[in-house]
Amino acid sequence: MNTAYIMLSSNDFPVQNIDRAIEILADHFEVADQSSVMVTKPVGAVYKADFHTMALKIFSDDNADDTIAIFKMVEQTLGRNAESKLNGLIPMDIDLIIWNDKVVHSDYERFDFVKNCIDEIR
């Protein structure tokens, strides 16, 4: 069993999309814990609205690549496509931050809100 800490972010119907993402993820993984939701200003001029961001701790029987593939499927199910970033509205972004106690994404050190959300449940 693998332990993963992931970030969920949305600036397009964020409350609904985060709730729905958790429901879908729970069909594939054991969701062990979740952080509080933080509202953050977008980084970059392209984004049109503030982001709602939170961390989840999940357990996965899959390897990291297969786990990430499920994240991408969830993003697409919730409406993420190639135009999302161009339009400045992201229905769902899911990033693997920590895999089995190893930081695998630079956002953990790059953004305080990522570190704060993860550390809240770690």
Image: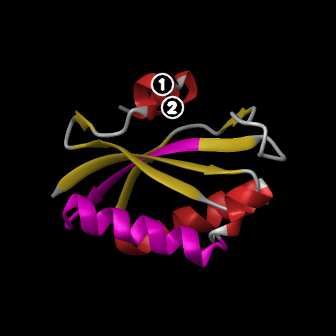
Residue drawn 46% across and 68% down?
Answer: 72
Q: What is the crowding at mark 2: few (fewer than 14 residues within 10 Å), some, or many (at least 20)?
A: many
Position of the C terminus by quadrant = top left
Residue drawn 48% across and 25% down?
Answer: 110
Numbered disc 2: secondary structure: helix
Give amino acid for label 1.
Answer: Arg
Quarter-of-image position of residue 102: top left
Judge by depth and name the residue closer to the eye, 119 or 10: 10
Residue under numbered circle 1: 110
| Above or below, 104 relative to 75 | above
Position of the N terminus by quadrant = bottom left
Q: Is 6 situated left or right of 51 in this image? A: left
- How far across and how far down the image is residue 116, in percent? 51, 25
Numbered disc 1: secondary structure: helix
Residue under numbered circle 2: 114
Residue bounds of the magenta highlight: 54-79
Q: Is 117 situated left or right of 87 in this image? A: left
Residue drawn 57% across and 65% down?
Answer: 21
| Above or below, 74 relative to 14 | below
Q: Is 85 situated left or right of 64 in this image? A: right
Quarter-of-image position of residue 43: top right
User: Do callouts 1 and 2 mark residues in contact (Cβ within 8 Å)?
Assistant: yes
- The number of numbered badges drawn on the structure is 2
- How far across and how far down the image is residue 58, in percent? 34, 53
- How far across and how far down the image is residue 25, in percent? 45, 67
- How far across and how far down the image is residue 111, in percent? 53, 26
Q: Is residue 109 visible?
A: yes
Q: Is residue 90 visible?
A: no
Q: Is residue 61 magenta?
A: yes
| Above or below, 94 relative to 37 | below
